[in-house]
Amino acid sequence: MASGYGLNGGPGRCYPFWQEVLGCYVVNSSEGEAGKKKCIPALEDYNECLHHKKEILRAMKMQTALRKAEAAPPRENSPNAEQIRSLGLIGKEEESAAVLAQR
């Protein structure tokens, strides 16, 4: 909220980020434009808290990658569900013994 108060009367969700931006500007105000450039990371954090643009973009990229993976044809040599479940270790005692005997 613009007043600095949240929905339940306490401080707003992004108010600590805004205080950080103001503190940065106060500390670096004597340096002019160079001082403002030092506050860019704090201002970006505040804007992300308000609008969640980076978070939304990341979620959209993940959804796109998931859709692409689902639409891709299956791999030729992919393991079946039983091989994945057992990791190839259960029910292979004879093969395991043969491998250990070679050492």
Image (cartoon, rainbow, N blue to C red):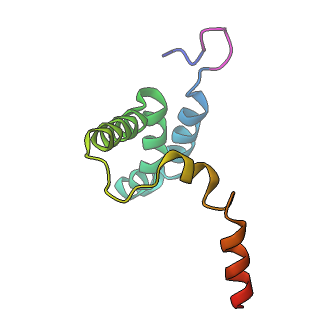
Q: Position of residue 27 (x, y in %)?
A: 55, 50
70 or 55, which is in the foreground? Answer: 70
Q: Is residue 7 magenta?
A: yes
71 or 41, which is in the foreground? Answer: 71
SS assignment for the magenta stretch, majority? loop
Residues shaded magenta: 6-11
As drawn, which residue projects farthest toward the bottom? 103
Please tell me which residue is depicted at 37% across the width and 60% down the height of the picture: 77
70 or 42, which is in the foreground? Answer: 70
Please tell me which residue is depicted at 59% across the width and 24% down the height of the picture: 13
Q: Is residue 100 magenta?
A: no
Write down the quadrant of residue 99 in the picture. bottom right
Please tell me which residue is depicted at 59% across the width and 20% down the height of the picture: 12
Q: Position of residue 81 (x, y in %)?
A: 51, 45
Q: Position of residue 79 (x, y in %)?
A: 46, 54
Q: Is 23 on the left or on the right of 9, as rendered? A: left
Please tell me which residue is depicted at 73% across the width and 82% down the height of the picture: 100
Q: In the rendered view, would you say 75 is above or below 4?
A: below
Q: Is 46 on the left or on the right of 66, as rendered? A: right
Q: In the rendered view, would you say 33 is above or below 48?
A: below
As drawn, which residue projects farthest toward the top? 8
50 or 36, which is in the foreground? Answer: 50
